[in-house]
Amino acid sequence: MEETMEFTYSSAKKGNCTVVTLGGALDAKSAPSLSKKLEDELQKKPSVVIISMKHVDYIASAGMGALINCNEKLSREKKDLRLCELSPKVEKIITMLGFTNFFAIYQTVDDAEKA
Amino acid sequence: MPSLHYDVLRTFEALDCFRSKITADLSASGAADSTVSAIELSVYEVIANIIEHESVDDSAEGSAISVDCVTGTHIICTLKWRGNEFDITGSPLPDLETHFSEGKKDGLGLYIIHTLMDRLRYRHDGKFSIFTMEKNASGEQR
């Protein structure tokens, strides 16, 4: 049986980008915390937010909603949210749901930074 | 046909444990990975919705959510819980373009369930909601 990892969040500056690394499950339990942390990140007025999801083992609608909300807030200010390093499970879910057209998705953090 | 049964308490901790267990059990039943992922996510969305929006008095019998899955060429999952009538199948589907352009969060769970499942049925017997979801085990699309 697969273990459910605890939600983790860290962020760092890389050039003019903020790179957020997420881990664990982005679900109904962790989504409020994720939304709050992303909101705090946006207060720092980054030009680009890159979210690495290689340690995310699950994403449900609540986690998706937090990312959609962050994406919209950045778009409104002509800034970018870029997802990268999707874990196989997250990639499968996002693909199944047809969300790949709505997010900018890259293989690596470097790819996302150079885009 | 083989069947699986779970009783899930209305907490996110219990939901996490259940999600791991049903995923392992459905994988062991031979269902396609895409089917397992679709059911895992859809069942999660229904139960998370019940936990967030449905109230139940603590003393009520049946405060846990009962989940029964029959596996075969189709996987049929039936969720039964005590509470007010709430027909998930009757709500209008959200427009995804609007969700993304306006940063909306509500209704995504509903979109997920409708998108991933082949068939949904809901009824309320006056005391319990009974929600059935069906998915082709091979992972073929409708």
Image (tube, rainbow, N blue to C red):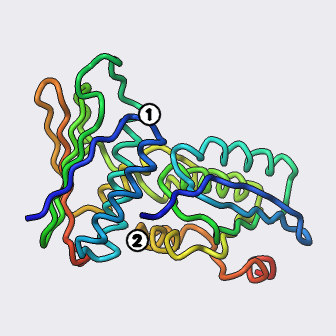
Q: Quadrant of the N terminus of chain A?
A: bottom left
Image marks 1 and 2: residues in contact by CB distance under 8 Å: no
> Which chain is disc 1 placed on?
B
Q: Is residue A78 visible?
A: yes
Of labels 1 and 2, the one closer to you: 1
x 89%, y 70%: residue? A14
**Secondary structure beneath disc 2?**
helix
Which residue is drawn at the image coordinates 36% and 57% (left, top)? Answer: B21
* Residue drawn at point x = 52 percent, y = 69 percent: A90
Q: Secondary structure at mark 1?
A: helix
Left or right: residue A88 compared with residue B54: right
In the image, taking residue B11 as reference, residue A4 lies left or right, namely right
Q: Nearer the viewer, residue A3 or A37?
A: A3
Q: Residue furthest front?
A: A1
User: At which x and y percent is residue A75?
Assistant: 70, 59
Dot 2 corresponds to which residue? A96
Can residue B77 be seen by looking at this rendering? no
**Residue B82 tag number:** none
Point out residue A62 in the picture as x, y percentages from the top left corner: 52, 48
Question: Which residue does the numbered mark 1 point to in the structure image?
Answer: B52
| Amino acid type of the residue tagged 1 in the rendering | Glu
Q: What is the crowding at mark 1: few (fewer than 14 residues within 10 Å), some, or many (at least 20)?
A: few
How far apart, in angstroms, are the residues tagged by discs 1 and 2?
25 Å
Confirm whether circles 1 and 2 share one chain: no
